[in-house]
Amino acid sequence: MTDRALPKSASVVIVGGGMQGLSCAVNLALLGIRDIVVLDAGYWQGGASGRNGCLIRPGFGGHEWTRLFELSWREWTTLSRKLGHNVMFTERGYTMIAETGPSADMLRNASRLHREYGITSEILTPRQLSGVLPAINQACVTAALHQPRGGMAPHHSVMKGYLHACRKKGIDVRYRTAMTGFDMHDRSVRGVYVKDHLIRCDTVVIAAGPQSPGLARQAQAEIDGYMMRIEAMALEPMRPLIGPALALIDSLAYFHQTARGEVVGGTEVPETPQENLRADVPAMAAMARVYTRLFPQLADIRILRQWAGLLHISSDLAPLLGQHPRVRDLWFSAGWSYGFAGAPGAGLLMAKAIARGKVDEIMRPFALDRFEKGNPIEEAGVVMIKN
Ligand SMILES: Cc1cc2nc3c(=O)[nH]c(=O)nc-3n(C[C@H](O)[C@H](O)[C@H](O)COP(=O)(O)OP(=O)(O)OC[C@H]3O[C@@H](n4cnc5c(N)ncnc54)[C@H](O)[C@@H]3O)c2cc1C
């Protein structure tokens, strides 16, 4: 908690200073909203926004995700200029690999869909893939979908860019400052508490990652979803081997090689939902198996470090975006499995909805009440275990 006194009022209080919270704050300021406060219980980059794989792609398997992430990808291409800080987004390409026939069919459908939205996306045979990835073991590949304009950005440079832009725009960002309760009137939020200090405000945005459902309950506002721990690891630096970012649909793995030469990635292993940040052996072993199958050259490379992060995952794996259907002025940007790639676009959509009172067509399907209305989103192109 900083020494500066907390303000007594704000127009918007955003709870959570990860990518989602900061992106929403910057976009609100760019739309002319003043007196924005961002509260974060932890340290800067302590949440999933400082622990992810840094992969970015415009296209998924279905319309809803593809429209959202294509918008976000367009934001990525101009984000450094928007924030006044180099976020180091590089379009190194993003290749999805199918190891089975059904996944190959899914990728073919996805590629057709991408082209409908003007996304450059091509299906490659194993032989064609070796043009993009000469080192890959072609025997593991049934088909691949290559999005040349996807890529990655180091999360530390992106978080720095967002924080820099917040500070320049006069947004009051506080780390180590947990929101502890709501001030409610009827079914409307009027402010938030930090211990016994009240910040009155017109709007509250919850972007608190895995803590979002718990905070929602404090306002008697249930939201869908559960907490999930996922893990990643980095190998020691080596010569350039892997050009594009990679995602394996069947092995539920994703990885890329950083500019420093480290191969960084993770894979999903079934486990009972956990709330701790301990990295463990099954995830490491599963990832090592994927690496050595696809790139046998990696067998001699040592593991440098391994870490875990916590996410809030919704029942259909898609984000929850918008105002709570039964609590006025309480908004959510939660349920994020791909919340790094999605942050620039989601922040823009959320800010427009709050500042202008009109929810964009791209954001509408992600409404919080889609489950009770029988409209969950179907998406086959995510690399994520469904519990
Ligand atoms: C290992 C791993 C790999 C990943 N790889 C990718 C990837 O390649 N591409 C991709 O798009 N996504 C990836 N993700 C997912 C992505 O990191 C998350 O979806 C995204 O960071 C979510 O951002 P967020 O701002 O919603 O949450 P977070 O970054 O978790 O931020 C939430 C913040 O809320 C704060 N908070 C909680 N409670 C309170 C409270 N009471 N008061 C105030 N603040 C509070 C926390 O301190 C935290 O800082 C990965 C995640 C992990 C863990």
Image: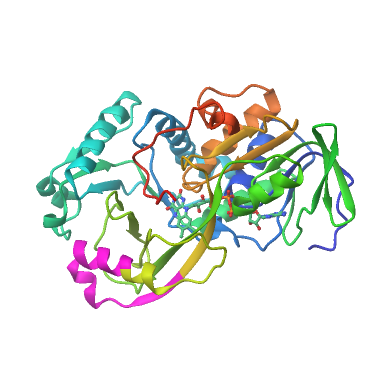
At a point 23% along the width and 42% down the height, the residue shown is 103
The range drawn in magenta is 286-306
At a point 59% along the width and 38% down the height, the residue shown is 347
Does 210 sit left or right of 138 as displayed?
Answer: right
Of the 4 image quadrants, the one containing the N terminus is bottom right
**Would you identify the image quadrant in which residue 28 lies?**
top right
x, y percent for residue 271? 43, 62
Majority secondary structure of the magenta segment? helix
At a point 64% along the width and 47% down the height, the residue shown is 213
x, y percent for residue 53? 43, 57
Q: Mark yes or no: residue 168 visible.
A: no
Q: Is residue 301 magenta?
A: yes
Does 62 sit left or right of 207 as displayed?
Answer: left
Query: Which of these two is toward me, 236 or 276?
Result: 276
x, y percent for residue 179? 77, 53
Q: Is residue 20 magenta?
A: no
Label count reads 0
Query: Which of these two is toward me, 302 or 192?
Result: 192
In the image, residue 199 sits, relative to residue 375, either above or below, namely: below
**Would you identify the image quadrant in which residue 186 lies?**
top right
| Colour basis | rainbow
Query: Which of these two is toward me, 43 or 63?
Result: 63
At a point 44% along the width and 54% down the height, the residue shown is 54
Q: Mark yes or no: residue 181 visible.
A: yes
